[in-house]
Image: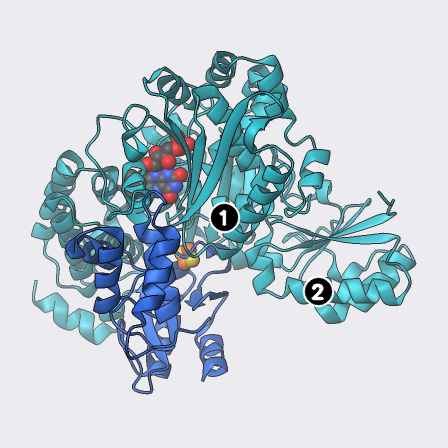
């Protein structure tokens, strides 16, 4: 292998690719060749780095200098200055919002406070190279599991680590594996849930784009633990790049004998097939996902029986989220005790969050569980753009709750967020500033559920429709106080009667906005006024006056 | 990858696709995907052929084809324009982008332009919220859109 004095990492994640990172990479290669640096400096395509707002991003190692918003036209100067003369190109260096000029990766506020377990290789290695994954310690955990541990040891380690499912429900992973391991039957499956449909969530896409082998390794360890020979990754149809990278990684792993018959000479047989979804949010729900994989309509099944007894094709099945599986190899390599040094007692480890909405650093971060919303928003997130005021943060995606400024210091883990009526969910964080209307955004949440209800059970099919109708009436000034009573009754009915958590959770976001921002609802309903001027039907004074008379 | 709308269904082609996947468990979705990729949408005749080939009832095949938002049982325009209307995009100004799209294309959701070039569709989160608001045209994602830039994007496809 040749030795390079410098590496230039170009982000090839979707977000940066959209902003033209491919052209930047091509220009870099030709520029380096042109100056005879081709043998000294290596250009590497990596997965997402997290700073999507600032893309395309380029990092030059060994110094770790981060350049942002790089265009192909910047490349000659970058090569000339940094790689030829060894000087940093100041004008492209990432600057923190507060105007502290910062240069290297570990010094930045954006990375300080982050702990990268799941994202350990994202933005660091070339996701299309199994050699680089292995060079970072990849597949060592699988080797350790197969040669030094029994399946029961693996399950015990996972249980001791306290890892909980990152797909939303937070079920203890070790326990799930134990149930599946104990279930009767010689055909069992491991399924990776990569359907990622929760609005505001794009972590699984970036994990698969940036480090597909970490998921394959996690699945193979799961297969060993529970005794499965076949695995599926169910991935949403829009994620073309993830699908491509995953397929490449699977081929490489098969070629190296890390999948297939007799893995590592241990006698373990396991292989993975990719199945592509066809566009239905509800298919992220595990039993609906099985229905879809089996070739049917993606409608949830009644539980119990649980998937660990009767899952895919009626067989015992372990189903885990992408991020959950990416946690497995580090736990096996470093041990449960190490894992528990991160995070909180009830929610050990880290969590990957996607920051969206009115926040300076939109993108992907990984932090220890238990960090407060305030630290995430004002520390790593860089605060609200243009110094506007914070209004609310929705945790857990569109199925999660909306929290006001008073709750900015709530620690983010499964249990603490549940106490304030919200959820950690998928790790989506939507930040909204005070120029937006809370009722309007609640209407958008309800529209989502109406659109995505699968229609199998009546309380959900009808309930989500009524919910959206009421919310629309409030934002157009046609609601009466009676609507609020109906809203509350509807929320109770749906929580109790819907078949799956989609319908059960549908009223949650709306009801939290109602709980924490009651005055704004009153303004819409009683005064026919939208305080922020967002709701178009109430925006002009003439309309609100006329409507006001009618009450 | 633009969809071509063909007149008569090439049943031999459908049979070939069915044959390729028949032995897989849960073959129906991969088959429908590939048939749609070749034909542009899923015409009734093709669904009948798939049902026959896989030994399933037509109602089951039809039920599946109509369940998923990425399957189309009616002909669509050459380019599918799918605009995200979920909360993160909404907060970043998706409504203005949607208004601009409707104005530019002169059709509303679910409709195809008279020249058969574009079909406009609203969708839930596309998983690219880091660059909200976002639109997907066929396989390509466009992000950080404004009412002006989305019109420029459409122009590229005219
Ligand atoms: C409506 C609905 C949508 C869901 N979508 C997803 C999803 O996109 N990805 C995911 O991993 N889990 C999703 N889940 C959770 C899964 O049902 C399941 O709990 C998860 O895949 C288990 O893996 P974990 O224990 O590793 O989290 C969804 C659940 C519901 C009710
Ligand atoms: S909310 Fe629009 S892409 Fe995610």
Please name whichever residue, A489 or B19, is drawn nearer the observer in this view of the structure: B19
Q: Residue at x 47, y 83 (%)?
A: B155
Q: Can residue A529 be seen in the rendering of this structure?
A: no
Q: Position of residue A479 (x, y in %)?
A: 12, 59
For the C terminus of chain A, the image quarter is bottom left
Q: Secondary structure at mark 1?
A: helix
Q: Is residue A138 above or below residue A277?
A: above
Q: Front-most of A120 and A251?
A: A251
In the rendered image, which residue does mark 1 sit on? A205
Where residue A477 sits, quadrant-wise, is bottom left
Which quadrant would residue B52 be assigned to in this image? bottom left
Q: What chain is tagged by disc 1?
A: A
| Residue visible at 29% across and 34% down in the picture | A313
Q: Report the residue at 59% width, 54% height from top.
A: A13
Which image quarter holds the N terminus of chain A? top right
Q: Is residue A45 visible?
A: yes
Colour of chain B, in one word, is blue
Q: CA distance from mark 1 to mark 2?
A: 22 Å
* On screen, residue A231 above or below B14: above
């Amino acid at each position: 292998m040749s030795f390079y004095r410098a590496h230039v990492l170009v982000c090839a994640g979707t977000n940066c690719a959209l902003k033209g990172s491919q052209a930047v990479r091509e220009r870099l290669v030709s520029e380096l060749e042109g100056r005879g640096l081709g043998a000294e400096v290596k250009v590497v395509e990596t997965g997402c780095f997290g700073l999507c707002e600032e893309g395309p991003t380029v990092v030059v190692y060994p110094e770790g200098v981060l350049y942002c918003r790089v265009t192909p036209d910047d490349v000659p100067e970058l090569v000339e200055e940094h790689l030829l003369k060894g000087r940093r190109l100041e004008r492209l260096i990432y600057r923190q919002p507060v105007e502290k000029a910062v240069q290297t990766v570990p010094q930045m506020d954006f990375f300080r406070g982050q702990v990268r377990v799941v994202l350990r290789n994202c933005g660091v290695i070339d996701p299309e190279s199994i050699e680089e994954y292995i060079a970072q310690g990849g597949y060592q955990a699988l080797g350790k599991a197969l040669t030094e541990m029994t399946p029961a040891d693996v399950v015990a380690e996972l249980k001791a680590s306290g890892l909980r499912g990152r797909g939303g429900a937070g079920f203890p992973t070790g326990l799930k594996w134990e149930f599946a391991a104990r279930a009767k039957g010689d055909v069992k499956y491991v399924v990776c849930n990569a359907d990622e449909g929760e609005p505001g969530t794009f972590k699984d896409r970036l994990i698969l784009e940036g480090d597909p082998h970490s998921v394959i390794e996690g699945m193979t360890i799961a297969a060993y633990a529970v005794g499965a020979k076949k695995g599926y990754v169910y991935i949403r149809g829009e994620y073309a790049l993830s699908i491509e990278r995953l397929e490449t990684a699977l081929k490489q792993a098969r070629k190296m004998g890390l999948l297939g018959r007799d893995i590592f000479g241990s006698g373990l047989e396991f292989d993975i097939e990719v199945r592509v979804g066809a566009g239905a949010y509800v298919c992220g729900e595990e039993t609906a996902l099985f229905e879809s994989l089996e070739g049917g309509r993606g409608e949830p099944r009644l539980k119990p029986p649980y998937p660990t007894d009767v899952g895919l094709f009626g067989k015992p099945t372990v189903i885990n989220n992408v991020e959950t599986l990416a946690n497995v190899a580090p736990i096996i390599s470093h041990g449960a005790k190490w894992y528990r040094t991160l995070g909180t007692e009830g929610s050990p480890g880290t969590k990957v969050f996607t920051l969206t909405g009115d926040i300076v650093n939109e993108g992907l971060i990984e932090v220890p569980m238990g960090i407060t919303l305030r630290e995430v928003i004002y520390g790593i997130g860089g605060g609200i753009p243009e110094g506007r005021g914070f209004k609310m943060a929705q945790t857990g995606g569109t199925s999660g709750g909306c929290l006001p400024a008073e709750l900015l210091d709530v620690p983010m883990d499964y249990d603490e967020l549940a106490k304030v009526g919200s959820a950690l969910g998928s790790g989506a964080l939507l930040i909204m500033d005070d120029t937006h209307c809370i009722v309007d955004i609640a209407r958008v949440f309800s529209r989502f559920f109406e659109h995505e209800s699968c229609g199998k059970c009546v309380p959900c099919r009808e309930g989500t429709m009524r919910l959206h109708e009421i919310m629309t009436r409030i934002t157009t000034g046609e609601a009466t106080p009676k609507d609020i009573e109906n809203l509350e009754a509807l929320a109770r009915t749906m929580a109790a009667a819907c078949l799956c958590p989609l319908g059960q959770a549908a009223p949650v976001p709306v009801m939290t906005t109602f709980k924490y921002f009651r005055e704004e609802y009153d303004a819409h309903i009683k005064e026919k006024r939208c305080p922020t001027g967002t709701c178009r039907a109430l925006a002009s004074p003439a309309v609100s006056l006329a409507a006001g008379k009618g009450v | 990858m633009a969809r071509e709308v063909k007149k008569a269904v090439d049943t031999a082609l459908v049979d070939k696709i069915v044959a390729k996947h028949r032995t897989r468990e849960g073959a129906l979705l991969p088959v429908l995907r590939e048939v749609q990729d070749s034909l542009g949408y899923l015409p009734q005749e093709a669904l009948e052929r798939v049902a026959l080939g896989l030994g399933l009832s037509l109602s089951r095949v039809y039920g599946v084809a109509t369940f998923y938002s990425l399957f189309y049982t009616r002909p669509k325009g050459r380019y599918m324009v799918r605009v995200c209307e979920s909360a993160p995009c909404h907060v970043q100004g998706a409504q203005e982008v949607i208004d601009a799209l409707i104005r530019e294309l002169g059709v509303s959701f679910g409709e195809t332009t008279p020249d058969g070039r574009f079909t406009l569709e609203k969708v839930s989160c596309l998983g690219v919220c880091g660059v909200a608001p976002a639109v997907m045209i066929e396989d390509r994602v466009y992000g950080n859109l404004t009412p002006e830039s989305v019109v420029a994007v459409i122009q590229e496809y005219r």
